[in-house]
Amino acid sequence: MRAQNHQPPFTLRCRVYFEDTDAGGIVYYVNYLKFMERARTELLRASGFAQSQLATESVLFVVHSCEARYLAPARLDDELLVSADVIELNRASLRFRQQVRRAADNVLLCEGQFLVACVRADSFKPRAIPPALFTAFADMCGVNQSSVGE
């Protein structure tokens, strides 16, 4: 189910370190994906769900697919604002819209969407998102839970 009326996206602040840059002194493209992964992880943590605890309950989230657009470079020492917004919620998957902006001037550097699947930790087979977590995601994106299909 697509999000309806949702709250502002979760935002993580992070800094660009030397290890994040390429020989040209700009953030290497794949590192934007790492920044976005961290934002999704911290969104879970801020909602009361640590990935380490979920794994002990045989719950893992894996990226099924992603799409990214690179618009402007980030450089060494830039402070970044990395957002994670749930825009679609299904029984065993959810879609995030994410953006990376430079904090100093709010310029959009990179944006993307990620389809994330919930799987069993022991078999990596799809499983339903646990009810408490599903409710938290539904609250984030303003989805009426009774309208979510199987």
Image: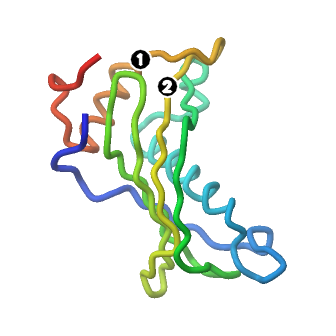
* Side of 135 where 99 appears, left or right: right
| Disc 1 target residue | 128
In the picture, the quarter occupied by the C terminus is top left
Label 2 crowding class (10 Å Cα cut-off): few <14, some 14-19, many 20+? many
Three-letter amino acid code at the position of disc 2: Cys
Q: What's the CA distance linking mark 2 and mark 1?
A: 7 Å
Tag 1 secondary structure: loop
In the picture, the quarter occupied by the N terminus is top left
* Side of 110 where 131 appears, left or right: left
| Disc 2 target residue | 118
Tag 2 secondary structure: strand
**Which of disc 1 and disc 2 is earlier in sequence?**
2
Point out residue 40 in the picture as x, y percentages from the top left corner: 50, 47
Q: Please name the residue shown 57% across and 15% down the image.
A: 125
* Side of 10 where 49 appears, left or right: right
Label 1 crowding class (10 Å Cα cut-off): few <14, some 14-19, many 20+? some
